[in-house]
Amino acid sequence: MPFAPQIRIPATYLRGGTSKGVFFRLQDLPERCQQPGPARDALLLRVIGSPDPYGKQIDGMGAATSSTSKTVILSRSARPGHDVDYLFGQVAIDSAFVDWSGNCGNLSAAVGPFAIANGLVDATRVPRNGLCTVRIWQANIGKTIVAHVPITNGEVQETGDFELDGVTFPAAEVQLEFMDPADEGEDGGAMFPTGRLVDDLEVPGVGTFKATLINAGIPTIFLNAEDVGYTGTELQGAINGDKQALARFETIRAWGAIKMGLIQSVDEASKRQHTPKLAFVARPRDYTASSGKPVRAADVDLLVRALSMGQLHHAMMGTAAVAIGTAAAVPGTLVNLAAGGGERQAVRFGHPSGTLRVGAEARLVDGQWRVTKALMSRSARVLMEGHIRVPADSF
């Protein structure tokens, strides 16, 4: 019987923050994959190597973690005041599903560098030396991200001395501004979808938990670590090896999604794996990060552990960091209280790989909290560029 040949698609494999993903220019995709739909999803699944019942993604570019099962599609933006449109697809590992419901804050750091290097930013806007400001339209969530990308001799600078916990080697710093990160509706209250800073989240068969439900960066459910039996110092092995704990967290996440109005029934949660995120917070205490680096209580404002795609994240999702910074800036949230309460414009939090600082500008307007921007620094680096090969009949 005849077999389909493999086709070649231009692509770049990049690290952004503590994630990795396959980046495409929209114009380079096969024509039927240049529009949203089953063909595009099938292509990206095949590129990453999903669905994989073995959970390894051996036959694709994924590495069987939520941090590495990612795809990005970029194009020049027709939106006034923006350079590039950024679409992110979180690819499930063991099922045939691409989740388009949210952004990846870590890979956001790689969008500006890729856009500049691949001709998606007007060359007249790129300085010979200095910072190139790239205005990004995040198409999944309809938000603006501003990236400040270092340029040396007219090219993107990737190497440097900026260190990011969770990434082995230093690189050049990319500063990110997440503009108006809260998902505010017409009534101005959707940043906190229930209208409250702290809710009682009832989870049938599990319990009732104090929770801060927030739409900022990415929809996120924050719990107190002690309420779920943890200290906030846990590393991946303490949770990811406990199937009962993971199932409990997923049940809490599903009921939180219902309370946030993201789904109508718990059965829908399996088709919305990327959002909302679930995290738990605690007051500072000493612990040892996964690298062996000591983290002292005096060095952080609070501790945060977050789950992504059903597993405890090895560091912190960039979008969840935006949610942390935003919630910390609003007095009375669980995040703010874990950090000591009061008004603040930035926090440094401890995560499994070390620490991260994130800032947010918040103010009270007509009785509602508004956040104008969240800020953090990441880094990015091209790992490989060339062509992806996939069987021609796979999409």
Image: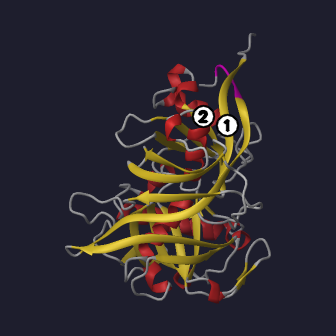
Question: Residue 129: x, y in percent?
Answer: 61, 48
Q: Mark 2 points at which residue?
A: 118
Question: Image quadrant of residue 174?
Answer: bottom right
Give the residue drawn at x 42%, y 36%: 77
| Majority secondary structure of magenta residues | strand
Q: What stretch is highlighted in magenta?
A: 388-393
User: Going from the N terminus, do you reach mark 2 or mark 1 first?
Assistant: 1
- Labelled pair 2, 1 in contact (Cβ < 8 Å): yes
Q: Residue at x 53, y 30 (%)?
A: 26
89 up-or-down from 29: above or below: below
Kindly report the distance in space between the C-alpha atoms of the residues bearing marks 2 and 1: 10 Å
The verdict on residue 359 being magenta is no
Looking at the rendered structure, the kind of residue marked 2 is Asn
Front one among 155 and 287: 155
Can residue 163 be seen in this snapshot? Answer: yes
What SS does tag 1 mark? strand
Q: Nearer the viewer, mark 2 or mark 1?
A: 2
- Which residue is under mark 1? 12
In the drawing, what numbered circle is on residue 43? none
In the displayed structure image, the side of residue 339 where residue 142 appears, left or right:
left
**Residue drawn at x 66%, y 80% as measured from the top left:** 233
Q: In which quarter of the image is the N terminus?
A: top right
Residue extending furthest toward the right: 292
